[in-house]
Structures are given as C-alpha cells and as structure tokens.
Image (spheres, helix red, strand yellow):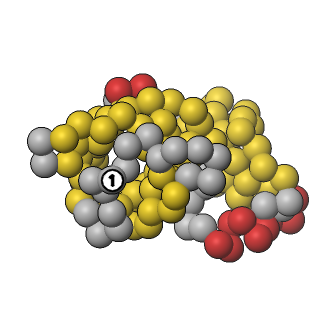
C-alpha cells in the first residue's frame, strides 16, 4: 500500500460505514491483513449504504464551477467517489443536464461533471445541486 492509504468501508454486522486510514498491510498464509484506523464514521448506516453506491463525506469547502465563460463559486456540502453536493449562491445559469468544469483546489481536483439535479436552497438564496464526475484530473 504505497500509493493509496485511505479507503471506504462498510461493516454490515456493525451497521458501520466510513472512511479508514490504512495503517499497515501484511500477508499471512495467502491472506491480506490490514490495520485500519477509522475516521468519519457513520453508525446505523444500513439504510444509507443501500441507497448510495459510495460513502459520502460531509465537508464545507470552497471551489469554482465553469459554465461556458461564467465562473461560479460553490461550497461543497458532501463528497463521494463519484460526485458532490454543492451550494451555489448564484445558480440561474445552472440546470440539471448541464455539463460543467469544476476546480476544487482544496482537494486538488479538476473535473468535468454533469449536473444530475437542482433544488432551491431552503435556507436562503441560491440552490443546491448534485453533480456526477465524468472525467477527473
């Protein structure tokens, strides 16, 4: 495990979902043995795991969407391996089905993504959108 030291995990018997740091890896009698340190753990996650394909990490980080020549600032609310939930203050130029460029410097992500859904923000101005990654750099 020289390159990737973080994994998503679901333990059905414990109804536990989350992100783990891989502390060490060894092999014994043809089996792989790992030491894991849990972080961002969700308990009683059985229903959540059935509903989603990937673990979703709650975050509060800034980034930018680029649509044609327009640049829109966003706040990422949650992040998974295949998409993000974003809050936009100015969302008039965005709608479901749009393909957008994404610059998310906090995580070092540049991507091409598709807007899957859009809802008005119930807490104030703007909108919340869900995007699915198409290409990630």
How many marks the image carries: the answer is 1
Judged left or right of residue 36, residue 76 is left
Residue that label 1 marks: 92
Q: Secondary structure at mark 1?
A: loop
What residue is drawn where x is 78% and y is 49%?
42
Viewer can see residue 27? no
Of residues 82 and 6, the one nearer the viewer is: 82
In the rendered image, the quadrant that contains the C terminus is top left
Q: Is residue 52 above or below residue 35?
A: below
Residue 53 x/y as whole percent: 56, 67
Residue 106 x/y as whole percent: 42, 26
Judged left or right of residue 44, residue 75 is left
Q: Is residue 29 above or below residue 37?
A: below
Judged left or right of residue 127, residue 93 is left
On the image, which quarter does residue 33 sit in?
top right
Residue 109 x/y as whole percent: 33, 36
What residue is drawn where x is 59% and y is 44%?
124
Which residue occupies the extreme left position in the image?
Answer: 69
Neighbourhood count class around disc 1 (C-alpha, 10 Å): few under 14, some 14–19, many 20 upward = few
Viewer can see residue 23? yes
Which residue occupies the extreme front position in the image?
Answer: 125
On the image, which quarter does residue 19 sit in?
top right
Which residue occupies the extreme bottom position in the image?
Answer: 50
What residue is drawn where x is 69% and y is 66%?
49
On the image, which quarter does residue 62 sit in?
top left
Of residues 122 and 15, the one nearer the viewer is: 122
Of residues 66 and 23, the one nearer the viewer is: 66
What residue is drawn where x is 50% and y is 53%?
128
């Amino acid at each position: 495990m020289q390159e990737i030291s973080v994994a998503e995990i679901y333990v059905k018997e414990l109804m536990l979902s989350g992100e783990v740091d891989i502390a060490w890896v060894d092999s014994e009698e043809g089996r792989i043995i790992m030491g894991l340190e849990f972080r961002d753990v969700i308990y009683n996650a059985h229903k959540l795991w059935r509903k989603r394909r990937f673990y979703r990490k709650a975050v509060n980080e800034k980034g930018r969407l680029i649509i044609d020549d327009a640049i829109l600032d966003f706040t990422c609310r949650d992040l998974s391996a295949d998409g993000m939930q974003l809050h936009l203050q100015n969302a008039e130029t965005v709608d479901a089905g749009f393909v957008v460029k994404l610059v998310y410097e906090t995580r070092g992500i540049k991507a091409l993504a598709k807007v899957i859904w859009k809802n008005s923000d119930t807490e104030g101005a703007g909108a919340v959108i869900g995007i699915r990654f198409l290409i990630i750099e």
